[in-house]
Image: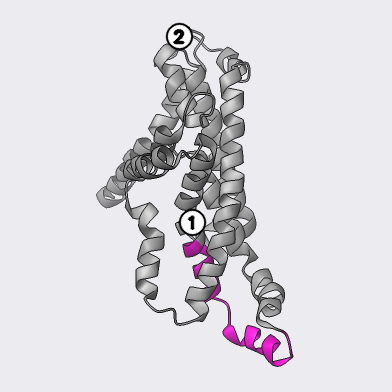
C-alpha cells in the first residue's frame, strides 16, 4: 500500500512539474487586471481578444508560419533523398555524414545563430529573410533525415527490387513504391519540423531584424515595453496549437512510431 501511495505521489509531482507552468500561464492569461500576475486579478477573456488586435503579432505570425511551412518543405526536399541514399547505399563515411547532418541538433542554437550572423549575413550581405529561411531549413534538416530514415529502414527492400526487375527505373520505383510507403514518416517529419521551426528562439533571435521578426522574438520585444497578460494569452494559444497538432498527428499517423 505504501509503495502504491509513493508511486501516485511521484506521478502527481511529475505531472505538476510538467503541466504546472502551463496552467499558471492560462490562469494569468485569464486575468482581468492590467498587469501580468499570478494569481489572476479576476477573470476575463479580453487579453485573448487583444492578441488578435496587435498588428505586430499578426505580422510576425505570418513570418513564423511561412518559415515553418516552406522551411520544412525545403528540408524534406533535401532530407528525403539523403535518407534514401544512406539507407539504400553504402555511402563512404556514412557515420561522418550522419554526424554532420545532426550537428544543428547537437550544437546549441545560440552558437548556430551567431555563426550564421557572423559568417553569412554580415560578410556576404545576405538579407534577413533569406538568412532566416536558410537557418530554419538547416535546423529542421536533421529531423527530416532521421525520421524518414527510420521509416525507410522498416520498408522491405525486395518491394523496390521487384519494381526494378519489372522494368521500372530507379526514380520510378522510388516514386511509385518507396514514397507511398513512407508517406507516414514524411508527414511525421513535416509536423515535427513545423513545430520545431515555429517555436524556434535562439537562432531567430540573432537573425531577426527591424520589420521582420518571428512570433517568439516579437513576443520578447513586446514584453520589453508592455507587461500585460496578452503575452500569456498568446503563449496559451500557441501551446494549445502545438499540443493539438501533435495529438492529431498521433491520432492519424502514429507520430510516436517515428520519433
In the figure, is residue 190 to the left or right of 221? right
Front residue (pair 144, 36): 144
Name the main secondary structure of what is drawn in magenta.
helix
Q: Earlier in the sequence, mark 1 or mark 2?
A: 2
Badge 1 local density, few (<14 within 10 Å), some, or many (20+)?
many
Q: Give the range drawn in magenta.
A: 145-168
Q: Is residue 156 inside the magenta stretch? A: yes
Q: Residue 167 at what x, y percent from top left?
A: 74, 89
Please tell me in which quadrant of the rendered image residue 36 appears.
top left
Q: Residue 56 at what x, y percent from top left?
A: 57, 21
Badge 2 local density, few (<14 within 10 Å), some, or many (20+)?
some
Q: Disc count in the image?
A: 2
Q: Is residue 149 inside the magenta stretch? A: yes
- SS for dot 2: loop
Q: Is residue 251 above or below residue 237?
A: below
Question: Does residue 162 appear in this view?
Answer: yes
Q: Residue furthest left?
A: 2
Q: Are marks 1 and 2 in contact (CB under 8 Å)?
A: no
Question: Does residue 37 appear in this view?
Answer: no
- SS for dot 1: helix
Q: In this view, does 127 lie above or below 92?
A: above
Q: Residue 110 at what x, y percent from top left?
A: 33, 40
Q: Which residue is drawn at 46% across and 38% down?
A: 125
- Say the numbered circle drawn on residue 41: 2
Front residue (pair 256, 71): 71
**To which residue does mark 1 refer?**
141
Q: Residue at x 36, y 36 (%)?
A: 16
Q: Residue 53 at what x, y percent from top left?
A: 63, 16
Front residue (pair 2, 149): 149
Q: In this view, does 56 lie above or below 172?
A: above
Amino acid at each position: 500500500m505504501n509503495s502504491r501511495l509513493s508511486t501516485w505521489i511521484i506521478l502527481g509531482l511529475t505531472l505538476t512539474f510538467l503541466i504546472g507552468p502551463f496552467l499558471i500561464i492560462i490562469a494569468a492569461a485569464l486575468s482581468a487586471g492590467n498587469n501580468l500576475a499570478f494569481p489572476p486579478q479576476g477573470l476575463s477573456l479580453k487579453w485573448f481578444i487583444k492578441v488578435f488586435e496587435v498588428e505586430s503579432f499578426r505580422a510576425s505570425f505570418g513570418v513564423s508560419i511561412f518559415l515553418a511551412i516552406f522551411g520544412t518543405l525545403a528540408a524534406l526536399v533535401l532530407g528525403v533523398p539523403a535518407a534514401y541514399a544512406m539507407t539504400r547505399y553504402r555511402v563512404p563515411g556514412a557515420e561522418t555524414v550522419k554526424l554532420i547532418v545532426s550537428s544543428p541538433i547537437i550544437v546549441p542554437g545560440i552558437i548556430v545563430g551567431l555563426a550564421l550572423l557572423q559568417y553569412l549575413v554580415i560578410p556576404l550581405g545576405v538579407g534577413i529573410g533569406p538568412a532566416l529561411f536558410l537557418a530554419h531549413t538547416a535546423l529542421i534538416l536533421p529531423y527530416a533525415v532521421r525520421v524518414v530514415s527510420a521509416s525507410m529502414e522498416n520498408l522491405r527492400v525486395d518491394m523496390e527490387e521487384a519494381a526494378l526487375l519489372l522494368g521500372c527505373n530507379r526514380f520510378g520505383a522510388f516514386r511509385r513504391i518507396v514514397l507511398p510507403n513512407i508517406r507516414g514518416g514524411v508527414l511525421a517529419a513535416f509536423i515535427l519540423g513545423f513545430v520545431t521551426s515555429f517555436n524556434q528562439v535562439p537562432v531567430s533571435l540573432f537573425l531577426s531584424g527591424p520589420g521582420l521578426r518571428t512570433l517568439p522574438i516579437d513576443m520578447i520585444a513586446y514584453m520589453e515595453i508592455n507587461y500585460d497578460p496578452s503575452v500569456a494569452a498568446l503563449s496559451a494559444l500557441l501551446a494549445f496549437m502545438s499540443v493539438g497538432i501533435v495529438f492529431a498527428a498521433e491520432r492519424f499517423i502514429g507520430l510516436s512510431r517515428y520519433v
